[in-house]
Amino acid sequence: MKYKNLAWKILGGLLLLIIVSCSMTIDSIVLPSSINGGDNLPVTLNVKITADQAQTSNFMVAILVPKVWKARQNATMSFVSDVTTGPQQMTVIPAGQAAPQGGGLDWPTLLLNKVGNGGNLIPDYEWVAFYSNTSYSLAGGAPFGVTVSINIKTSPDNLSFKLGYCVANSSDGLSSPDRYGSKFSDCFEVHGTGDLIDFCNPQLSSIDPRTSLENDIVTVTFDGGVDSTQLTNASQVNMCMTGVLTTGDSVTVCTQTDATKMIPLGLNKWQKDFWPRKFFNLADNQHLSGLRYYFTDANGDHKVGYGGGGDPFTYTFKCQ
Amino acid sequence: MKKLLFAAVCAAGLFACKPERLVTPSEPIKGLSGSWAIIRATRNGTDITSRFDFSHFRINFADSSYTIDSLVPFIVSRNGKWSFDDPLYPFNINFRATDSAVKASPLLFPVVGGKRNVIITFSPGCDLNSYQYTLQKAN
C-alpha cells in the first residue's frame, strides 16, 4: 500500500512536469531603432513553441501600441513556422470577443490585466490581438520555431513608446504564465510632428485628456517629484498660461490668483482643472490652437518650464 | 318581520353592487420644468465633480425653452428650445440653441433617494471625450 501511494505521487509529479513544461516563448524581437512618423513599422518576432500535449488551436499574437496608431485598422500580421508551409495569415480579433479561460474578459482586457502595460506612463495605449486564420493540430514533440511578421502603419505623431508583444493560443489563453510568452521593447522613438508624446519617461507636466479642444475641461498636472526644480517643496504653485489663438495672436493669464492656483496632491504633485474658453475669457469668434505654459510659486518669483528650464511647456488643441 | 328584514337586506345588497371601472395605469409625462443643478460630473469615466466648480451652473427648463446660468462646458452654450424624442418614453433629449443645429443627448431619468435625477451624456469638445452630468432640481 505504501509503495502504491509512492508510485501515484511519482506519476502525478511526472504528469505535472509534462503539463508545466508546455511553453511558448519570444526568443528575440527585430525592429528598427526608430522610424519617422507615418512610416510602416516592420517587426519580426522569433518564437519557440513546445507542445507536450496534443492540441488543436489557433495561434494568437498581440501587440501593445499607442491608441493613436489605430492598429486594429493599420496593422497586418502573418507567420511562417517549422511545421507549416508558406506564410500563414492572421486576422485581428474583434474587441469584446471573450478570450479562452479569461473569465469572460476579452483579449485586450485580459492582456492588460495579466501582461500589463510595459511601464508606459500615459494611459493611451491598447493591446490588439490577432488569431491565425487556421487552427493547427500539434502533437507533443520537440520545440519548433515560428517567425511572426508584423507591419504597422504608424501615425504622423511624435512619440516614444515601449512596444509590447504576447504569443499564446486559443485553447490555453493566458491561463498561466507558462502557457504564453511576452516581451516589451525598450523605448521606441517615432520622429513625427507635433508635441512629443512621451510614454516612457515621467513628465514634469502633463495634460489630460491627451487630445482636447478649448471647450473641454482640461487637467494640468505638475509633478515636482520627477526632478529637482525651483518649485521643489514650494508651498503653492500657480499656472502661468498663454493661450495661442488660431489667428496667431495670444492671450496670457499669469497672475497668482485663485484662477491659476493649483491643488496640492501631495509629494510635490499639483493639479488644476480648467475650462480654457472661460479661463482666457474668449469671445465667440476667438479660438485656441494651443497653450504655452509655466509654473510659478506664490509670488511669481520662480518660473519653471519644460524640463525644469526656461522654455515653456506646450500643448496643441486637436482631436486626433 | 323576518321576511321584511330579508327583503331589505337583499335590496341593500343589490344596490350596493356597482360595476368596477378598471383604469389602465398610464405612464406619467416626464416633466423637466424648473431649475436644475449639476450634482455629479464625469469626464471619460473619471469623476471630476469636486475638481471643477459646477456649483453655480443652472439650467432652467420651461415648457419648450431653456435658459442657462453660469455656463460650464455643456451640450449647448446658449439659451434655446428643448424637447424629448418621445414625451412618454424619452430616450433622448434634444437641445436647439439659438441660431444653432439640434444637439441630442442620451437621457436617463432615475429616481435616487426619492429625488428625480436627469443624466445626460455629451461631448462639448473632442468627440472622443465623453462627459456625463447628473442633474437634480435645485432647491
Image (cartoon, coloured by chain):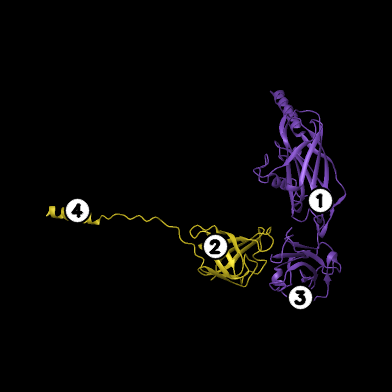
Question: Which chain appears yellow?
Answer: B
Question: Which chain appears purple?
Answer: A
Disc 3 versus disc 4: distance between alpha carbons?
91 Å
Residue type, label 4: Cys
Tell me the residue that label 2 is attached to: B117
Q: Nearer the viewer, mark 3 or mark 1?
A: 1
Tell me the residue that label 3 is attached to: A256
Disc 2 versus disc 1: distance between alpha carbons?
44 Å
Pointer 2 and pointer 3: residues touching (CB < 8 Å)?
A: no
Is residue A228 visible to the viewer in this orientation of the structure?
A: no
| Left or right: B91 in relation to B130 | left
Residue A19 drawn at (x, y percent): 74, 32
Pointer 4 and pointer 1: residues touching (CB < 8 Å)?
A: no
> Do discs 2 and 3 belong to a common subunit?
no
Residue type, label 1: Lys
For residue B19, above or below residue A140: below
Decide which of B29, A36 is in the foreground and name it: A36
Tell me the residue that label 1 is attached to: A162
Instruction: Farthest residue to the right: give it.
Output: A33
Q: Find residue A51 and report its image quarter.
A: top right
Disc 2 versus disc 4: distance between alpha carbons?
55 Å
Residue type, label 3: Gln
Residue A296 drawn at (x, y percent): 80, 72
Decide which of A203, A45 is in the foreground and name it: A45
Tell me the residue that label 4 is attached to: B10
> Do discs 3 and 4 belong to a common subunit?
no
Residue at position x 84%, y 69% in the image: A230
Disc 4 versus disc 1: distance between alpha carbons?
93 Å
Residue type, label 2: Asn
